[in-house]
């Protein structure tokens, strides 16, 4: 179907009603996307499909590379348990040369990405440094730790045009204050940021010291007019 829509500008693909979707289906979608040079907005909802592997994301990568008009990209792979760090490498390769890209929203919750994967993600952010909107949902990622955030620091510091940032680390029990110190350095460079949302709910190793790191990072954000900060109650922080 997509091959017949060569002049479309916006696509939202959701497979919620299907019992399963596999790598071959993603390969077909990738091949179809290569035909749509006018596409500006792409959203892919692939959550809870264990049948999707790195090979499927690699096939999708080929289609992404040709979307030179793409302005916004959104991907949801929540609970896709068979994806590894290689999928983030393929995602980086597919998006890194799209110079018109201004918005990226990724839901990577309940996935097994590790420090190496977040290094790939940081490299992507360095390449698409004209982004104005970034949303990263990393809830309940069992391998998400402070080293992962440290790996993201270089990518965050390159996003000097960012207007809106949403970060969610709920239920990340390995994430500590040290990771928030790295996030502080990134925030300091986002001088055009107008809206910031950070979710640290139910991340038990975050203390008041970590919150102070974030607050220090906010001092340079003179354009910030909307702040949402969700963490454990002050009584529980120590």
Image: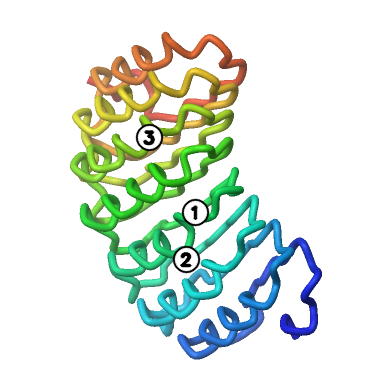
Kindly identify the residue that appears in the image at 42 percent across and 57 percent down.
Answer: 108
Q: Which tag is nearer the camera, tag 1 or tag 3?
A: 3
State whether residue 80 is above or below residue 102: below
Disc 1 to disc 2, C-alpha distance:
8 Å
Residue 165 location (% of width, % of height): 51, 34
Quarter of the image holding residue 73?
A: bottom right
Between 130 and 142, the one nearer to me in the picture: 130
Left or right of 73? Residue 96 is left
Left or right of 173? Residue 127 is right
Kindly identify the residue that appears in the image at 35 percent across and 76 percent down.
Answer: 54
Q: Which part of the image, by quadrant, shows the C terminus?
A: top left
Q: Residue 77 — which label? A: 2
Label 1 with label 2: CB-CB less than 8 Å: no
Label 2 with label 3: CB-CB less than 8 Å: no
For disc 2, the neighbor class at 10 Å (few under 14, some 14 to 19, many from 20) is: many
Left or right of 87? Residue 66 is right
Q: Earlier in the sequence, mark 2 or mark 3?
A: 2
Kindly identify the residue that appears in the image at 30 percent across and 25 percent down.
Answer: 236
Q: Which tag is nearer the camera, tag 2 or tag 3?
A: 3
Q: Which part of the image, by quadrant, shows the N terminus?
A: bottom right
Q: Earlier in the sequence, mark 1 or mark 2?
A: 2
Disc 2 to disc 3, C-alpha distance:
22 Å
Residue beneath disc 3:
156
Residue 132 location (% of width, % of height): 58, 35
Label 1 with label 3: CB-CB less than 8 Å: no
Q: Residue 106 — which label? A: 1
Between 50 and 224, the one nearer to me in the picture: 224
Residue 135 location (% of width, % of height): 51, 43
């Amino acid at each position: 179907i997509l091959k017949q829509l060569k002049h479309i500008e916006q696509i939202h693909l959701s497979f919620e009603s299907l019992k399963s979707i596999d790598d071959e289906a993603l390969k077909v979608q990738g091949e179809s996307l290569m035909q749509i040079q006018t596409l500006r907005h792409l959203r892919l909802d692939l959550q809870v499909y264990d049948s999707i592997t790195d090979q499927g994301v690699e096939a999708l990568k080929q289609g992404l590379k040709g979307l030179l008009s793409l302005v916004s990209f959104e991907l949801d792979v929540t609970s896709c348990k068979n994806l590894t760090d290689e999928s983030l490498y393929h995602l980086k390769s597919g998006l890194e040369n799209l110079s018109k890209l201004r918005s990226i929203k990724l839901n990577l919750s309940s996935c097994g990405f590790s420090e190496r994967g977040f290094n790939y993600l940081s490299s992507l952010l360095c390449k698409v440094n004209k982004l104005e909107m970034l949303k990263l949902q990393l809830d309940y990622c069992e391998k998400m730790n402070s080293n992962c955030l440290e790996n993201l620091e270089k990518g965050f510091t390159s996003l000097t045009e960012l207007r809106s940032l949403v970060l969610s680390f709920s239920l990340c029990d390995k994430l500590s204050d040290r990771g928030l110190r790295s996030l502080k350095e990134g925030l300091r460079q986002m001088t055009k940021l107008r809206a910031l949302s950070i979710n640290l709910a139910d991340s038990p190793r975050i203390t008041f010291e970590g919150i102070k790191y974030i607050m220090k990072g906010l001092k340079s954000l003179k354009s910030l007019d909307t702040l949402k900060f969700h963490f454990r109650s002050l009584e529980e922080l120590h």
